[in-house]
Amino acid sequence: MVNQDDAAAPGGPPRPTLTTIRRSGDAPAEGHDIPSFFTVAQEGPEEEEESSPFSAPEPGDIDEAEPEAGLFPRAPRSFGEVGLSKAFLSDLTLKILYYAGTPTVQQLTRRLGLNTEIVNELITGLGEDRLVEVISQSDLYTGNYRYRLSERGNARVSEALERTRYAGMAPVTADQYSHVMNKLHAHKQEVPRARIKEILNELVLDGDVGDHVSRALFSGKSAILYGPSGNGKTVILERFAKDLGGFWLVPAAIYAFGQVIRVFDPSIHQVLTAEEEVAAIGAQARLDRRWLVVKRPAMVLGAEMDRDALDMAYDPQSRFYQAPPHIKVQGGALIVDDFGRQAIDAKELFTRWLIPLERGWDTLGLQSGEKLTLPFKTQILFATNLRVKQLADSSLLRRVLYKVHISGPTVQGFQEILRQSCRQRNIVVEDGILDYIADCVYNEPRLKPRAAYTRDVLDMLVESAAFDGKKPVLDRESFDRVFRLFLAQETEEEDDDWG
């Protein structure tokens, strides 16, 4: 058995050739090589062929290139097909080794998103340059070698980290990204009508509102839901965004003009499990694993949104870019809630997104001055409490085909919302109390009834019952107690914009 420290002492002099003696009849596990710095003593005239964990595969070991099929990019089989320089990939491998410690080739393959042949070739080059070392395992014949940085490799990785600290999967090139996005956009995925109806059936929408909302969401085009606050605009869009159905392909990052642009965002992108992936796209053994198969993405931006969300963000600490939200949610939905209240002017936001969306591509600027043009297509949905004409001029508003007014509920709608809310909260409802509450709300001249009133009143009722040490019951006495408190604060906040 060879001492592990002897086998991979970082920064030391060139290793001596070490010899391991095997008992007669012992042999390496089939299909696994032995490190070149181990020689094997073997009885008999026939010598065991020696190979190395730093040796590249023979040409015959690599499958012939296969034609790309369908929507899915085929795994690259050479550096030319990867589209990135060997120097960049070598530095990326060193950084992964730096952060991961002592990974195996299989682990490096997963981390880089490249196939074993390419990773082996990278490791071969790094080994020949004495930038990485092999760490032996307890069983020298398993072939499950681990690699670590040498002292020289540690110096080299410091230089690589100065350029960029990105240490994720190998990026795709801008051309590769555009090619895949164009194919995916041509394969339109719609939210099923049954899913939209399911969303809206959970709400109480009066008249034709439900039908209008359904058609706007199903279209896949931009839309504005407008009207006084508290009537469900945000709820509708958030539930729509929760599960769009279908799938999308997202690269870990894009490489352009010598810069890395991070696209995959775990706070937005939900990677499909192996079973979900097979169900969605079938068995794709040759899929380029630099792309992740995710559920169609969606993101909600609120009033806190500023101008920084419109373009790529450069992090001077990590030294790479983050793609803007509208690029991260390609093929999904981007929801702008409380539209018109952002720090950025509504007209500027319309111009920044709607014009590129209409032409099908967007241009992003880098700090170096280069411009990156990428395909751009997603469903942008706005929710606003302002009147539509206050948002922008007619030339911009015409670019949003669907504009749906979400009005306050009718008396019957208000009662139904209240009934459903009490059922969900297990609140006992006294006979006739719903009519009494509707009379109080709709005959109060200082109020403009909204669907959210039901939630607010019931919240206060439950908290009031807890204060009294009782179970909540919706009766006249409990309602009158909280309604006086509710009325005092609500009439102070009432907005006359929708009078």
Image: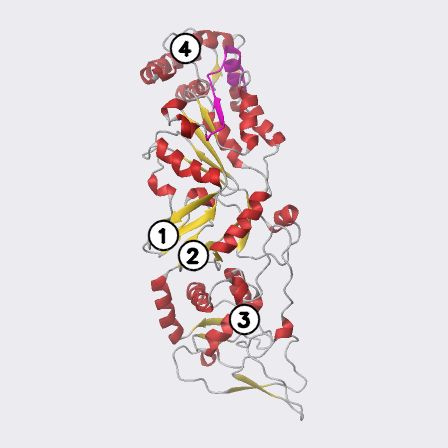
Which quadrant of the rendered structure holds the C terminus? top left
| Span of residues in magenta | 399-420
Of the pair 270 and 256, the residue shown nearer to us: 256
The percent coordinates of residue 11 (x first, y second) are: 38, 78
**Rounded to the nearest whole Å, what is the CA distance between mark 1 and mark 3?**
34 Å
Q: Read off the residue under disc 1.
A: 366
The percent coordinates of residue 475 (x first, y second) are: 48, 11
300 up-or-down from 426: above or below: below
Query: Which structural element holds mark 3?
Result: helix
Chain-order first, disc 2 or disc 4: 2
Chain-order first, disc 1 or disc 2: 2
Question: Callout 1, which amino acid?
Answer: Leu
Chain-order first, disc 3 or disc 2: 3
Question: Callout 2, which amino acid?
Answer: Ala
Q: Read off the residue under disc 4.
A: 480
Mark carried by residue 388: none
Which quadrant of the rendered structure holds the N terminus? bottom right
